[in-house]
Image (cartoon, rainbow, N blue to C red):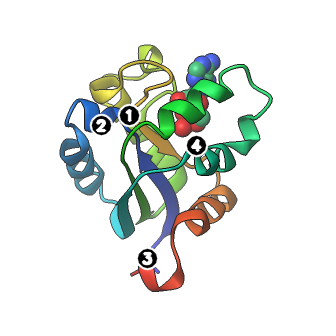
Amino acid sequence: MNGNLTFTMIKPTAFKNNSAGAILKMINEAGFVIKAMKLTRLTPELAGEFYAVHKARPFYGELVEFMSSGPIIAALLEKENAVEDYRTLIGATNPENAADGTIRKLYATNLQQNAVHGSDSDDNANIEADFFFSKMERF
Ligand code: CMP
């Protein structure tokens, strides 16, 4: 392996504003290598499981509803310093606070529909990748 891994989801936002291709282009141009990828749709149960860490938060119900409202792209990305570099590329969780030129600044609709998810640690990158990908689906 040439670097570290991070996990991303391109959220249903990107299928409402047709930005999935542009987001993938930004990911490649920033030097991330795609190690696994799938277009899929989460059921409410699976979206709830993925975001279980936020279960007690007031926005949990809406988050689960939104994340199961349409297709997503799940992807495992490799790069040196992947987790931190990807969080820099996507920008702040709330697009209003995201730096110019970041994925969320360019393509997010609002805090909930913020275009992409990115792992917050190496451990979570592995946990999140295991949620979506078997060994046979990783390259
Ligand atoms: P994500 O990186 O996918 O991780 C959890 C998601 O919850 C986050 O992006 C936002 O889309 C959403 N989120 C976080 N805080 C709030 C909030 N205060 N209100 C609504 N949604 C939120």
Pointer 1 residue: 115
How far across and how far down the image is residue 107, in percent?
A: 29, 28
What residue sits 46% from the left and 63% below the top? 80
What is the C-alpha distance between the residues marked 2 and 3? 29 Å
Q: Position of residue 126 (x, y in %)?
A: 62, 65
Tell me the distance, in whole angstroms, between the alpha carbons under discs 3 and 4.
35 Å
Which circle marks residue 107 in the picture? Answer: none
Q: Nearer the viewer, mark 3 or mark 4?
A: 4
Circle 1/circle 2 CB separation < 8 Å: yes
- Give the total of numbered labels: 4
Q: CA distance from mark 1 to mark 2?
A: 6 Å
Mark 2 burial class by Cα count in 10 Å: few <14, some 14-19, many 20+ = many
Q: Position of residue 21 (x, y in %)?
A: 19, 47
Q: Which mark is residue 2?
A: 3
Precedes in sequence: disc 2 or disc 3 = 3
Real-space Cα distance between discs 2 and 4? 19 Å
Nearer-the-camera pick, 7 or 20? 20
Q: Residue at x 45, y 48 (%)?
A: 85
If you read the primary sequence from the N terminus, does the residue marked by circle 1 or circle 2 appear first? 2
Residue in the foreground of this view, choosing between 33 and 129 = 129
Q: Amino acid at mark 3?
A: Asn
Residue on which disc 2 sits? 14
Q: Secondary structure at mark 1?
A: loop
The residue tagged 4 is 44
Task: Label 2: state its secondary structure.
Answer: helix
Q: Amino acid at mark 1?
A: Ala
Looking at marks 3 and 4 on the same chain, the residue that comes earlier in the sequence is marked by 3
Q: Is mark 4 within 8 Å of ligand 1?
A: no
Residue located 51% across and 46% down the image: 118
Relative to 32, 113 lies left or right: right
